[in-house]
Image: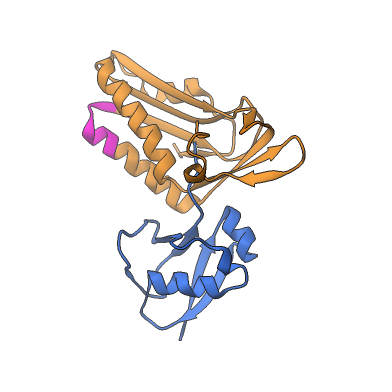
Chain colours: A blue, B orange
Amino acid sequence: MTRYHVETFARYAELLGSPSLAIELPNPTSASAVIAALRQLPGGDALPDRPLLAVNHTLPRADVSIGPSDILALLPPLAGG
Amino acid sequence: MAFLSTAPIDPAAVLADVRSPSHGGTALFVGTVRDSHRGRVVRRLEYSAYPAMAEGEARAIVAEASARWPVAVAARHRTGSLAPGEVAIVVAVASAHRESAFLACRWVVDELKRRVPIWKREWYADGSADWIDPAADALGSS
């Protein structure tokens, strides 16, 4: 198993108790597996069905493959402006 | 110039970034903090962001607008704690003619709101606070 770090923000940082999360998954893994693992963390059951997971500062259109060097961020609904 | 700003934004400074004698029209959008939301009195609004992604996404939107229309674009978004009336977002779009300036300005504002990772939390007169989700609040966006 490999350790993956995931940043999160705003309401999700409150839900999950921290802006910096760590999960253990195989290498490589997938965006959907990362989200499933985040859902297992304390408070993670309150996440919506399909939260936004940014990979290397972009939102992938499909369920991409992920390795430990990828930059992961779990984003609440965007609300700028 | 960075897109995110912790300091107050001067719309005139954003306008100056697109000023050129070749432009005949400039559209300026200034988004400010409202003092009410869904019947509640808003005392302040707190913007936070994911800067590493927000800066790149804002640059991409400006580049896409410049590819779609013959325009010059400048945009800034404030972060931190803002009082009602303070400037939250400024978009200036200049072009040879007004049509593309109006079209591109609206498009850039909409894309910034849709794609840039920024979040806002409203604090109300009764001491309570809410994170804002525009999708759950389609009638409440600025």
Is B68 in the magenta? yes
Magenta stretch mostly in which secondary structure? helix
Residue drawn at point x = 66 percent, y = 31 percent:
B83
Q: Is residue A4 visible?
A: yes
Indicate whether B96 appears above or below A28. Answer: above
User: Which region is colored magenta?
Assistant: B64-71
Q: Is residue A77 left or right of residue B64?
A: right
Q: Is residue A69 visible?
A: no
- Residue B12 at x, y percent in the picture: 48, 20
Indicate whether A43 appears above or below B95. Answer: below
Identify the image quadrant of residue B22.
Answer: top left
Indicate whether B4 appears above or below B101. Answer: below
Indicate whether B133 appears above or below A75. Answer: above
- Residue B35 at x, y percent in the picture: 65, 27
Q: How many marks?
A: 0
Is B74 in the magenta? no
Residue drawn at point x = 32 percent, y = 67 percent:
A63
Residue drawn at point x = 26 percent, y = 33 percent:
B66
Q: Is residue B50 left or right of residue B84?
A: left
Q: Which residue ends up furthest to the right in the rendered image?
A: B126
Residue drawn at point x = 52 percent, y = 40 percent:
B137
